[in-house]
Image (cartoon, grey):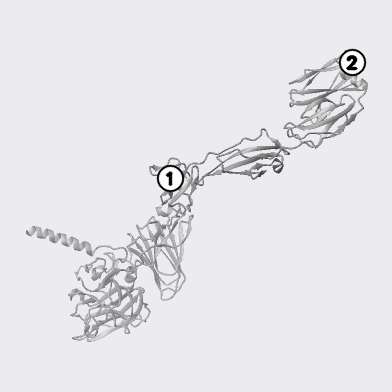
Amino acid sequence: MKNHLNIISLIAIILVSSLVNAQEPGAGTCYDFASNTMVAPNDASLNPTYMSIEAWIKADSWGANSWENVIVSKDGWASGPEGYTLRTGANGTLSFNFGSGGVWTEVLSAPTMLTGKWYHVAGTFDGATLRIYINGEEVGTTAYVGTIANGAYNLTIGGAAYTVGGTRNFDGNIDEIRMWNTAITNAEIQDYMCKKIDASHPSYASLIAHYNYDNPGYFLDGSTNGNDLTNLGATQVTSGAAIGDASIHQYGGPYDLSLGYPAVDSINVQSTNSISTIHLYRLDMAPNTINTGGSMDSLDYSHYYGVFVGSSAAYNYTLDYNYHGNPLAIGNPTYVDLAGRTNATVTSWAPQGGTVSVPTTTITKTLNDRSEVMIGIVCPHINLDLSGTINACQGDTITVTDLGTNSTYQWYDGSGPLAGETSNTIDLFYTEDFYLVANDAACTDTSAIVNLLVFPTPTVTFGPFPSPGVCEDYPDVPLSGGSPLGGTYSGAGVVGTNFEPATAGPGAHWVTYTYTDMYSCTNSDSLLFNVFPNPPTPTITLNGETMCVISADTIGVVYEWFLNGSSVSIGPDTCYIAQVNGNYQVVASSIFSCFSDTSAIQVIDFVNLNEQMLSSSISVAPNPTSNFVEVRFANNAMNEATVKLKDAQGRILSTQMTNQNQVNVDLDNNASGIYFISIALKGDKAIKRVLKF
C-alpha cells in the first residue's frame, strides 16, 4: 500500500509540475478581478528586504485616488506601516509604496494610463531608490535609504491585504505577475516584459513568486517557493498582454527594428512618430485561435509576430513582413497576405490587405495600432454561378466563374472524376449530378453539387431547294422543307416562309431553319441558296478583227456569236475574232435559263478576198488539242510567213517565222480555253480558232 501511495504521489507531482509549466499561446489567459481577489498565505519568501514587482494590467475604470486600484498587496498598518503594494488609480496614476521605519514611502507617476488598454507596470526598490516603470520606461523615482518592513498579512492580488481602509479592488484584468527579492534593472524589465521568463533571465534565482494564470482552475506559483494562490471569485479570461517567446525593443526614434524566425521569415517595423517604445515579439506555437471567419483559407500558424507600441497619442508604423523562406507564402505569391488581429482577445484573424512584392518576397502594411500578424492565404472563390438544378440541352456548355489565376480543374459526377474534363467548361450530354473542384496552389474550392437534367437535342432537317440555283427574277420559293414543323426561317432574302431571290440579290445565301422544342432545346439546319444574275445586254467593242463583250458578267453566262444570223461560236468566251466579212451579233444567256439578250449588229467589212483564200488553204490540227497544233500550208512554194498565238482577248502569246509548209505551235504550258492562231503571208492574214483542253 505504501509503495502504491508513493507512486500516486509521484504522478501527482508530475501532473502539478506539468500544469505549472504549461505554455499557453502568447500571454495565454489572465483574470478579470472586478471586486474579487486571490490570496497566498504569508510566507518568509514573500517578505523581502528589497524587491521588484511586475505585472501586465488592463483597467476598466480608475478610482479617484492613486491607492484605490490595488494590483499586488501585502501591506497593512495595524501595528504600524509594514509590507508593500503596487497599485493604480487617479486617472491612470501608478503607485509603488512600502512601510519602513514607521513611515510609508511612495513613488508616483503622472496620470498617463488609459482604461481599456494593456500596460506593463513595475516597481523596484534597491535600498536607496524607489522606481516605477510603465511599458519599460522609468516614470518616477523616490529616494529612501532603508529596507522594507516585513508584513504579517497574506499576499493579495486584485485588492488590499489589510481591508480596514477599504477593499481597494482593481477593476480589470491582471496577468503575468513576477515578484523578485532584488531590484531588477531597467534593462531586465525592457528585455523581458514582452517575453516569457525562464532560467536565461539574469535574476532568475531571485524570483519569489510568478503567476502566469495559464492553467484553468490552478493558481500555482511558477517559482520554486510554492506560494500558490486561492481564487476568491476572479474570472479567467483571454489575456491581451504582449508576451512572446522572443522579443526585441527600441526606445526613442526614429524606429527601425527587426525580428526573425530563423531561415523562414522576419518582420521589420519603421516609424518616425513620437512613440516612447516599440517592442517586437515572436510566438513559436499556434495562437489561441486560428479562426478567420471564412475570410482567409490557409494560415502558417507555426509561429506569429506581435508589435507592441508605447504611446498615449495617435501613431502609425510601417510593417514589412519578409517571407523569404516561408513555404506557404513562396508557394502562393499571388494570394499571400498578412493575417492580423490587435491581440489575443480578438477572436478572429482578418486579412490586412498588405502590398505584396514578389521580387523582394515582402508584404508591406501601414498600421496604427498594436497588432499580431502571421502569413495567410486569401484564396479566390469560384463557381459562384453554379448551384441548384439546371435544365440543359444535350451538347450545351457550362462555364463557371473563376477568380483564380492559375487554376486547375476536375469535374466529377456520382461515379467519380470525369476523364478529360479538366477545364472550367464542360459539355453536357446526360442527366447526372455534377460538381467541380478547382485548385490554385494551396487554394482549393469545390462547387455546389448541381443536378443537371439534360434533354435531347431535336433532330432538324431542311430542304430541298432548286439545284444548282435560281435567277434573280425567279418567283418566290416557298420554304416548307423544315422538319419537325413549327420552326422559323432566317437569312438574307427570307420573308416570312418564302425565299425571295430578288430581295436576296445575286450571290450565295445561307438560309437557316431553327426549331425549339418544349424543353427550350434548339437545333437548326442550313441550305445554300444560289441566286444567279440576269445577263446584261451585251455591247461589242472592236479591236482590229477581235470583237469582245464589255461589262460582261460571266457567272453562269454563255455567249453565242452569230455571223449573218448563223451561229459560229458558243461558250463562256467573251471575245471572237472575225475571219470573214459580215454582220456579227452576240447573244448573252444564262445556263440557269435566266433572261437572255442580244447585242447590236457589228459589221465587219475589212477582211479581203485574198485573206479568205489564204484561210481556206491553211489547216490546223489536231483541234481540239492538249499540247500543240500543226499549222500546214497547202502551197509548198511559200514565202516567209509570220505565225502568232493569241489568247481570246487578242493578246499575243508567241510569234515565230517560217518559210516551210508546216510549223508547230506549242500550247502545252497554256491553260485550257480558246486560242487563235494568226498567219500573215504576203500582206494577207488568216485566223484559225483552236480549243485547248
Q: Is residue 582 above or below residue 435?
A: above
Q: Is residue 463 above or below residue 615?
A: below
**Residue 119: percent from left, percent from top:** 34, 73
Query: Quarter of the image containing the C terminus?
Result: top right
Which dot, 1 or 2, sits closer to the camera? 1
Q: Is residue 278 above or below residue 1?
A: below
Query: What residue is shown with label 2?
Result: 638
> Would you call the spot at circle 1 few (<14 residues within 10 Å), some (14-19), or many (20 or more)?
many
Q: Nearer the viewer, residue 499 or 679?
A: 499
Q: Is residue 463 left or right of residue 572?
A: left
In the rendered structure, which amino acid carries the disc numbered 1?
Trp
Query: What residue is shown with label 1?
Result: 411
> Would you call the spot at circle 2 few (<14 residues within 10 Å), some (14-19), or many (20 or more)?
some
**Residue 38: percent from left, percent from top:** 23, 74
**Residue 369: percent from left, percent from top:** 42, 69
Q: Is residue 693 left or right of residue 237?
A: right
- Of callouts 1 and 2, the N-terminal one: 1
Q: Is residue 398 left or right of residue 78?
A: right
Query: Quarter of the image containing the N terminus?
Result: bottom left
Name the quadrant containing residue 325: bottom left
Q: CA distance from mark 1 to mark 2?
A: 90 Å
Residue 190 in view (yes/no): yes
In the rendered structure, which amino acid carries the disc numbered 2?
Met
Q: Is residue 678 above or below residue 6?
A: above
Q: Nearer the viewer, residue 265 or 102?
A: 265
- At x 46%, y 64%, the residue is 365
**Residue 167: percent from left, percent from top:** 24, 82
Q: Nearer the viewer, residue 582 or 401?
A: 582
